[in-house]
Structure formats: C-alpha cells, structure tokens
Amino acid sequence: MYEHLTVLGAYVVWTVLFIVLGAAVLGSLIAAPLRLVKFYIVYALAFLVYAAGWVSAYFTLSGVAGEWAGSLAGSILMSLVFAIGFKRTHSTSLYAVLLFVANSLGYFLGSGLFESIGGKTGMLLFGAIYGLFLGAGIGALLHFAQVPRTTS
C-alpha cells in the first residue's frame, strides 16, 4: 500500500477500514438504551481523532519515538471522545491508560512479528495482532462506559 498510496494514503485507508469494520463488530457490545446510530457517530469520531493524534505524533517525531508518542496521543484523544460520548468524563484517564496499554501491546507485538517474519504474512500478522489488541481495549472501555453508575 505504501508504494501505491504513500504512507499517508495507507494510513487513511487503514483508518477507514478500522472505522467501518470496527464499528460493525463493536456495535454489538452496545446496550439497548444507547442507540446504535449514536454509537457509530461516537466511534467514528473517536477513531478519527485517534488516527489524527497517531499520525501527527508519528510524522512529527518519526521512528520508535513517534510510534510511542502516537500510541499515547491517539489513546488519550480516543478516550476523551468516548468519555464525552458516554457521559463518563470522570473516567477519561482510566480509559486512556486502558487503551494505551492495549494499543501499545498490539502495535509493538505486531511490529515485532512483522520484523521477524517479514513480507505479506508478517504484515497480515501485524494487522491482526494490532487489531485484536486495540479492539479488546476498546471493548473493555465500552464495557466500563456502560456499567451502571453507583451512588455513594
């Protein structure tokens, strides 16, 4: 994809795929009171700001430092959108830590597989591991965002 679309073009395609496919899968985790249309809007916005944060940090710093900064910036921005969307702003930092850990584990484990295996197989494994870990992090966030509030 880098050869045909450039690095930025590849990131745009991956972002669209993550939004469309991720929302379709993760939408099944949404409780009935929250309308699915609202979830799709919140999810798309969350992923767009995640991607913007990631790409901005990566292109600013590049290399491994850019990858770590991108993971952090993207996780914080995505968490903020989800916290606002689910009216759980007091949980933003919990969501950010959860996403940063899942995001970074998936990204760097996937990257390690790609580096050791290489080629198309390595790239597919990278995408699968990254997507599974990030999806699990988002799934956990969605669970915590929907847990009924307790009054103390």
Image (tube, rainbow, N blue to C red):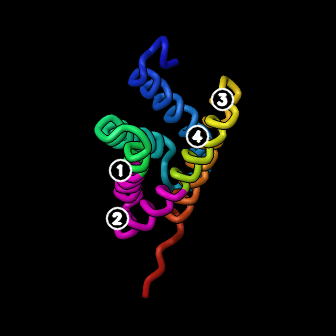
Q: Which residue is mark 1?
A: 73
Amino acid on which disc 1 is placed: Ala
Boundaries of the magenta span = 72-101
User: Which of marks 1 and 4 precedes in the sequence?
Assistant: 1
Q: Which residue is mark 4?
A: 111
How many angstroms separate mark 3 from mark 1 (CA)? 27 Å
Q: Is residue 85 visible?
A: no
* Residue drawn at point x = 35 percent, y = 55 percent: 80
**Which percent across, then down, holds residue 76?**
37, 55
- Of labels 3 and 2, the one closer to you: 3
* Residue drawn at point x = 35 percent, y = 70 percent: 90
Residue 79 located within the stretch drawn in magenta: yes
- Of labels 2 and 4, the one closer to you: 4
Q: Crowding at label 4, few (<14), some or many (≥20) Cα neighbours within 10 Å? A: many
Q: Which residue is mark 3?
A: 118
How many angstroms separate mark 1 from mark 2 (CA)? 17 Å
Amino acid on which disc 3 is placed: Gly
Amino acid on which disc 2 is placed: Thr
User: Which of marks 4 and 3 precedes in the sequence?
Assistant: 4
How many angstroms separate mark 2 from mark 4 (CA)? 32 Å
Element on which disc 2 rests: helix
Which quadrant of the view contains residue 59? top left
How many angstroms separate mark 4 from mark 1 (CA)? 19 Å
How many angstroms separate mark 3 from mark 4 (CA)? 10 Å
